[in-house]
Image (cartoon, rainbow, N blue to C red):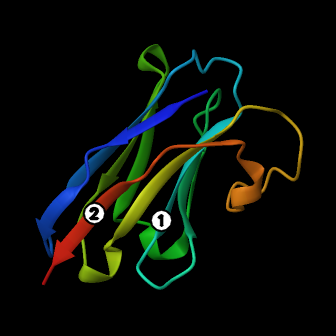
Amino acid sequence: VQLQASGGGLVQAGGSLTLSCAASDPTFGYYAMGWFRQAPGKEREFVTAITWRAGKAYYADSMKGRFTISRDPAKNTVYLRMNALEPEDTAVYYCAIKTFYGGSYDLQTGAEYNYWGQGTLVTVSS
């Protein structure tokens, strides 16, 4: 499976962006897709994830209320809508997919995902 992330760019603080991540293969039957981010000099962190069949969403506490994840099964695509962006949100955002059922089901853990996209840079200016 190949994942293509897009939608990053430069935005002013308080602005919004929507990221997209398209999977190369039909995603029916896959377990979940998620977004992680890595800021300069920091470790990768969980942002949000969504289970593919049920559409159940999970968010990191700091993103709740500002970020929204959604999916379009017909397009094999997951979206990340980011509102009220802050300079601290500046990072490379990576999408990932967990294609299998099993493991710990802890979607906040990067090790649960078996395919990753190349990342898209989001820069929030103050």
31 on left or right of 71? right
- Mark 2 and mark 1 lie on one chain; the one further toward the N terminus is 1
Which one is in front, 27 or 54? 27
Quadrant position of residue 17: bottom left
- Is residue 103 visible to us here? yes
Identified by mark 2, the residue type is: Val
Q: Is residue 94 above or below residue 4?
A: below
Q: Secondary structure at mark 1?
A: strand
Marks 2/1: CA distance? 10 Å
Q: Are marks 2 and 1 in contact (CB under 8 Å)?
A: yes
- Residue at 23%, 69% in the rendered image: 123
In the rendered image, which quarter contains the N terminus? top right
Category of crowding for the residue at label 1, using alpha-carbon neighbours closer than 10 angstroms: few (below 14), some (14–19), many (at least 20):
many
Q: In the depicted view, which residue is nearer to us: 37 or 118?
A: 118
Q: Nearer the viewer, residue 125 or 85?
A: 125
- The amino acid pointed to by label 1 is Arg
- Write down the residue under mark 1: 37
Rendered residue at 56%/71% (across/down): 44
Q: Secondary structure at mark 2?
A: strand
Mark seen at residue 122: 2
